[in-house]
Amino acid sequence: MGKFYITTPIFYVNDKPHIGHAYTAIIADVIARWRRLSGDEVFFLTGTDEHGEKIQRAAEAKHLKPKEFVDEIVKKYKEAWEKLNISYNKFIRTTDKEHEEAVNKFIERIYRKGDIYRGEYEGWYCVPDETFLADSQLIDGKCPVCGREVKKVKEEAYFFKLSKYRDKLLEFYGKNPDFIMPKFRMVEMENRLKGDVKDLDITRRSISWAIPFEPDKTHSVYVWVDALTNYISALGWPDGDLFKKFWPADVHIIGKEINWFHSVIWPSLLMSAGLELPKKVMVHGWLTVDGQKMSKSLGNVVDPVQIADKYSTDALRYFLIRSVKLGEDSDFSEKELISKINGELVSNLGNLLSRTLSLYRTYFGRIKGEVEIKCDVEKICSLMDGLMLYEALDEILKFVKDMNKYIAEKEPWKLEAEKLKVVLYNLLEGLRILSILIYPFMPETALEISRQLNVKLGTRADLKFKEVDYAPKRGRHLFKWVK
């Protein structure tokens, strides 16, 4: 049994989760479930980022204390993740006492290394993204990420010597060319590192809703240093058994807007602290609506819980992975979701199970093991191991289509008993294998297929045709046609 540590970013709790947050969590969940099927001991971390000026302002706007405000939003995240079947092992909050203690220990180690110094910051600051920006990064005088106004900031601050680690990080990239995926996201970071890398402001004096900076308590910790440390604090760093067992992370799942923080700042902080670097950073694109980034002001924020309630959790999970290639942006369309449900889930997958079990009930008898259809299990496993979820799901769907084609070509209702036994064997075994392959993507559907086949859901080791005594049960159609 191997060990596998996977994380989502901790989500900023200025509002309830939207479909973009759900997309990140579902990607991580699919990978976590696959690793468990593969026999690994998995630690899947998610959680919430609860400090900073934006939270403080949002709480004030609702006449709440910051902790009261974040407690309300955290509840909504946990409810959403339960609805979306996110199988996390731990939900961390940056207001957890253990996390705050770990942040100060982490900073103390870097401080002792001589990588933190006092200076003065003067420049631009984006409050919504909690990000410091240079003149060259602004687009029409606004934040390049969210497009909103920035403010001029000048204050005393403590800095981390980020520039000191530029060459070391570029060397690390050279030795680990798959550290950031997809590859073009690695190239973006390399090009930016080859430019002018400034030291990082890691404290603020004007924010009260933050972790105090222990070396000088007139300052508080910059929210991004606080947030990034969650990946080790959740494991009980520095002495926790989970940290010793699972660190370094096998993969951080993130959105493209926070690539710099995870692929440059975080590794540099870890280098300074003398800790191993994560093995991989997987960067996905944005989900847009009608070509625009989701925004409350535009009124185009999609609630994943409402979508799951309307169409089913598995349909939403399937659609989000099926519709977006890794690293690319994609437009969320309810019309396209309905098309995928009717055209692929109902017509292909659902009907395949219904037709097969109907055949078995009509021509009941002992099936005969002789393999006539093929599933490229090796290719699918390789794609899943390589985190190529879109491509793996595409291969799984080819197998579904091949099984439906097999029924059409064999016309089993016309066959004599001996030949029919072989066809039923191929269809029932094909469905059993299919239930395992789709489990990471659609866990409820996979379990329902297994239940109707009257077999236990298998593992990766069971992805092969074998002898099984079948006694299928009647059951519901997997998906409902959407008008």
Image (cartoon, rainbow, N blue to C red):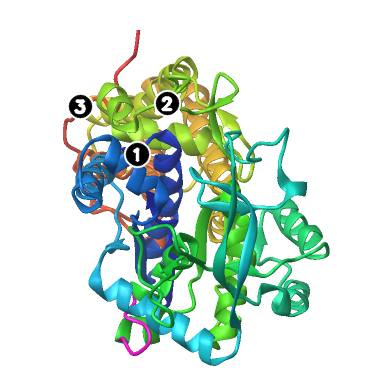
Residue occupied by mark 1: 17
Q: Residue under circle 2?
A: 296
- Report the residue marked by disc 3: 476
266 falls in the magenta region: no
Q: Is residue 156 above or below residue 414?
A: below
Dot 3 amino acid type: Arg
Over which residues does the magenta segment extend? 235-240
Distance between the Cα atoms at labels 3 and 1? 31 Å
Choose mark 3 or mark 1, whichever is in front. 1
Circle 3 crowding by C-alpha within 10 Å: few under 14, some 14–19, many from 20: few
Q: Residue at x 32, y 72 (%)?
A: 100
Q: Earlier in the sequence, mark 2 or mark 1?
A: 1
Provide residue 286's location: percent of width, then percent of height.
56, 37
Is 27 left, or right, of 242 in this rendering? right
Q: At which x and y percent is residue 396?
A: 51, 41
How many marks the image carries: the answer is 3
Dot 1, how many residues are within 10 Å of its Cα: few (below 14), some (14-19), or many (20+)? Answer: many
Q: Residue at x 33, y 72 (%)?
A: 234
Which quadrant is the N terminus positioned in?
bottom left
Q: Nearer the viewer, residue 8 or 293?
A: 293
